[in-house]
Amino acid sequence: MNNKKSILITGASGFIGSCLVEKAIEKGYQTFAVIRKNSNKQYLQNPAVNFVEFDFNNAPSLDKALQDFKAQFGKIDYIIHAAGVTKSINKQDFYNGNYHSTKNLVEALERNGVLPDKFVLVSSLAAFGCGETDEPITKHQAQKPLTEYGKSKMQAENYLRSKSNFPFVIVNPTAVYGPRDKDFFFLLKSISQGIEMYINNTKQKLSFVYVQDLVDAIYIAMESPAFNENFIVSDLENYTSKEFNNLVKKHLNAKTLTLVIPAPIAYFFAIITEGIGRITKKTPLLNRERLKEFKAKNWSVDATEIHQLGYKPNYKLDKGLQNAISWYKENGWLK
Ligand SMILES: NC(=O)c1ccc[n+]([C@@H]2O[C@H](COP(=O)([O-])OP(=O)(O)OC[C@H]3O[C@@H](n4cnc5c(N)ncnc54)[C@H](OP(=O)(O)O)[C@@H]3O)[C@@H](O)[C@H]2O)c1
């Protein structure tokens, strides 16, 4: 008889999901990594990982996967739903990957009688939108997402809130960085190559969380008595874009040329990079949706509620960037 609590983690092949899987094993959970047929298992090599394949867009196959799971393992104690689409130049991809996938999964869990004790939705700060004043964003303000990504995450959140008997919490991470991440890596690489870029000015207010701290926060929210609540997660500090770049420069020992690009010019470039993206079928880092986030003045946050649950980050930006940059160097991503 296995007395371990079981956990199912979606998006397990991704940056955050793979770190959640490692932590689940370390914490002694019977760990199920939800992947797709073609998901990359590079970071899921631990033999303690059990794999399950779900297709969120195919109800009969999802039902079968859940029935098979139930027959073999019984109950699922926890689910962390970290699968999601963070970048695309096609608006519909965000709604399919963030809203419909969440709704389809929850409906299938209900239909097949596989309700977890708690379901954690890994949403995003983007579901709140940027700060409209100089004050940090709080979970109490009205959600006004700027982007289709943020809107699709808010729609998934609203769906969960509409359910009366479904036990969930929602985690809203700010920008997540750390080993394995490919998004921040491009900014670091640009600085390592001597280019320090800003849109409009160097004073954008920002917040960050190192991936291991986010993982800790997610488990704290999951294992806490909290239900039907949002938790914004950061490293509990706020920074400016200049401070971020200065720390990167310090750890890379880089000298840079600073480019402050006016938003209309960045918009023009975004149209070009999107055009190239449509041909190459790759979403460029600079696109018109992302530009809305790059232009916003205030992404500082107030993460009081997760702190009150006992969350204490181990990595402020200085130490986190140092670790991330060391990892990129050790793994040959940066020279
Ligand atoms: N990174 C950040 O800064 C950040 C900040 C706030 C919130 N988040 C949220 O955190 C979650 C994980 O993000 P990440 O940075 O780890 O992204 P990631 O590295 O791109 O990983 C995304 C994961 O979701 C899976 N996925 C995507 N679309 C799917 C679909 N339609 N059906 C099933 N699986 C799908 C991917 O599977 P494949 O490997 O098969 O493609 C992958 O495992 C997302 O929900 C994201 O919105 C991220």
Image: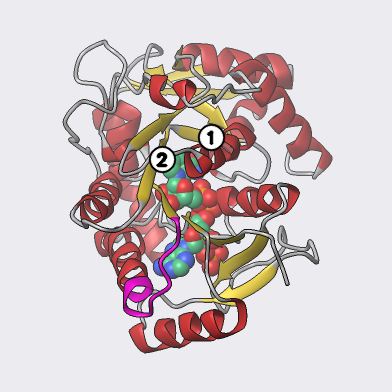
Residue 218 belongs to magenta span: no
Whole-angstrom CA distance, mark 1 to mark 2, is 8 Å
Judge: label 1 CB < 8 Å from ligand 1.
Answer: no
Q: Earlier in the sequence, mark 1 or mark 2?
A: 2
Question: Quick check: 256 left or right of 65?
Answer: right
Identify whether 119 is placed above or below 238.
below
Q: Helix or strand or loop: what does disc 1 sit on?
A: helix
The residue lying at 72 percent from left, 68 percent from top is 2
The residue labelled by disc 2 is: 171
Q: Quadrant of residue 89?
A: bottom left
Q: Which residues are magenta?
A: 108-117
Q: Quadrant of residue 138?
A: top left
> Residue 290: x, y in percent?
34, 41
From the viewer's side, name the closer residue of 90 and 138: 138
Residue 113 belongs to magenta span: yes
> Residue 213: x, y in percent?
60, 32
The residue lying at 74 percent from left, 16 percent from top is 253
From the viewer's side, name the closer residue of 259 and 210: 210
